[in-house]
Image (cartoon, rainbow, N blue to C red):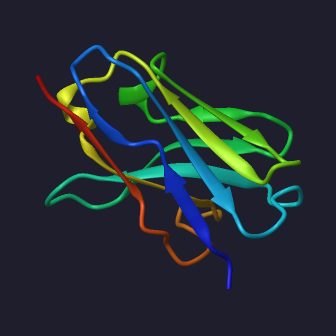
Amino acid sequence: QVQLVESGGGLVQPGGSLRLSCAASISIFSINRMGWYRQAPGKERELVARISSNGIRNYEDSVKGRFTISRDNAKNTVDLQMNSLKPEDTAVYYCNGVDLSRAGVWSWGQGTQVTVSS
């Protein structure tokens, strides 16, 4: 059973920054796509950023230019640098492998709460 542990969330003012980190219990070296998802209250979970094994990054339109995803295959971690945060970024953030239908590959971790508010 793969375990995913997300950390780094918190309360931040609009315009602020946070860096999220995800640690996987397995080697991610051979995992083609890793991604960060988020789920806001009353909404479905959505994929906001993904990174392939060769470093190609894709972002959901609302976070382009503000979020940066990275992966460290040696440490089995995936990070999400979030800048210029907006109230609408408030959500629980999760990481996972990403399958071809953009769904998560493994069971979800506990996520990390990000709250953007003044």
Whole-percent x and y of residue 64? 47, 23
Whole-percent x and y of residue 81? 53, 28
Q: Is residue 104 above or below residue 40?
A: below
Q: Residue at x 80, y 34 (%)?
A: 55
Q: Residue at x 67, y 33 (%)?
A: 57
Whole-percent x and y of residue 98? 62, 60
Q: Is residue 88 above or below residue 43?
A: above
Tell me the quarter of the image containing the N terminus: bottom right
Whole-percent x and y of residue 27? 84, 63
In this view, the residue in front, 102 or 85, is: 85
User: Where on the picture, by quarter, is residue 115?
Assistant: top left
Classify residue 38 as left or right of residue 116: right
Classify residue 67 as left or right of residue 40: right
Q: Residue furthest bottom?
A: 1
Tell me the quarter of the image containing the C terminus: top left
Q: Residue at x 61, y 39 (%)?
A: 79
